[in-house]
Amino acid sequence: MSELFEPLLRSYDEKRRAELVAAYMAVEHAAEPVPEVRFPALREPALRRTVEEMLALSGRTLVRTAVKGGSPRWTSAYRDDVAEALAADPACVPPPDERAVLTLILIHSVAIPRATGLLPDDSWLSPYPTPLEELRRRSQLPIGELEAALRRLRLAGLVSQVKAGPDEQGGFVPGPQFHRLTEAARRRLQEELILAAGPGSPLAATIRARRHSRARAASQQAAAQQSGAQQSGGAEPTHQGENE
Amino acid sequence: MSAPVPAPVPSSAPSSVPAEVLARARARLLGAHSIAVSDPAPPGLVTASDGSRVWLLSPWPDGATPAVLEEYDIAPMPLDRPGQARRVLAAALRCCWPRLDEAPWPGERVPVGDVLEVYARMSRGDPELARRWATGELRRLHDTGWLLLDEEAATVRPGPRIALWPEDSLGSLRDLIRRLPRPPEPLPRVDEQAAPADERREPDVPHEPQEQGGPVEDAGE
């Protein structure tokens, strides 16, 4: 079952190997980023590189999360280049109703509290739930479809449900998957949120202009690479360079 | 999630990611999705086949499972009602895994109503309410690849994730399943074990299992 990992794990003794496997499973399956101090394979840079290589086999990478006066924590995410390729594959993109519901939750639970200074700039997790009624009104989805979309979003860990308390309204907040964002993904999401919440704002215009010029530069680079590859007869596919 | 998924990413995808890495990332993202037996499975994935389809699953190193998180006291991804999900899965296995000395995968396709009935008998309180809870749970178990639910035909069978359970971990599960209430239709005597599921299915649903709701109504008696 582990032939995939064997070339990476082969050289380690049993103890190290078990530590690597534990760290890999922890960053892949824990709900939240795991503390570095608990996992030797995350603490030691050489072992951590191997964990990173294990993740890279499936297009994943390690993400170090913000330290709040404590020890660093780690989780895993799709590498940016892999995320981009997956997003171009229609089968890998959630259907429009799920995306619409998730966007509404991000606007209500993150963008609005952030704009009023209630949430720090870099947090995608929020204690401010979006009420079901709000989702129903704004999404204009029939209740059955809305509930099915919420069920799938919750299963995917993209949305969490908050139960109503005596003084608080229940609803939905961004789920634990929002820990799993690389720096570039956080930036992109931030931009998407600005485009969704204030499409006519000057900031949105700046983002669109920047993307436009970036896309143009990328297509020029791709064209240059393609002509280079044709000349050299194509390159051997290898692992991509490590993310930071 | 396990609905039919188009063929793997076209190789022309504008990406420098190695194709096998992208295929594994795709399989991870799609959960337990299936391809035709005749299609090549990307290397490095675990596969579970029922003879006509092959399900692609992400491999775990050295046979580890997410249960390793317990050793470190680390919370796994949250489930809404984990106890209920486990009980509904157990009720489904009670019905879909009639020959306990064999492997649970691929198991038998059974009417959803049988599973709801077993679950209702396992539960305290209002059996109608229990059936309704279990119906939602079956959908979630389907979405996560633990069961394969066909809502049109109102049937359910084991999901490909069950194929990953190592044989040596099944002992206590077999004991547990044996102790659960039996499915509503009387289970066959031991010497007839091979026949009943086929007998039960064939007269009602000759080829396409398209009878809507029939099995559920039967089981609701």
Image (cartoon, coloured by chain):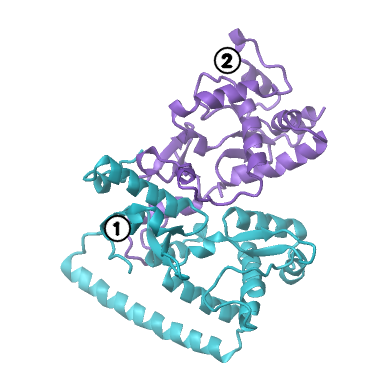
Q: Which residue is drawn at 60% across and 43% down?
A: B142
In percent of width and height, residue B42 lies at 36, 47
Q: Which residue is drawn at 54% across and 76% down?
A: A192
Residue, disc 2:
B194
Q: Which residue is drawn at 74% across and 42% down?
A: B133
Q: Is label 2 in a helix, a strand or a loop?
A: loop
The type of residue carrying mark 2 is Ala
Q: Residue A85 carries which label?
A: none
Among the 4 quarters of the image, the one containing residue A168 = bottom right
* Left or right placement of residue A22 versus residue B196 in this view: left
- The reply to whether residue A10 is in sight is yes
Q: Is label 1 in a helix, a strand or a loop?
A: loop
Question: Looking at the image, is B72 positioned above or below residue B17?
Answer: above
Among the 4 quarters of the image, the one containing residue A198 = bottom right
Colour of chain A as rendered: cyan
Query: Is A240 or A116 nearer to us in this picture?
Result: A116
Circle count? 2
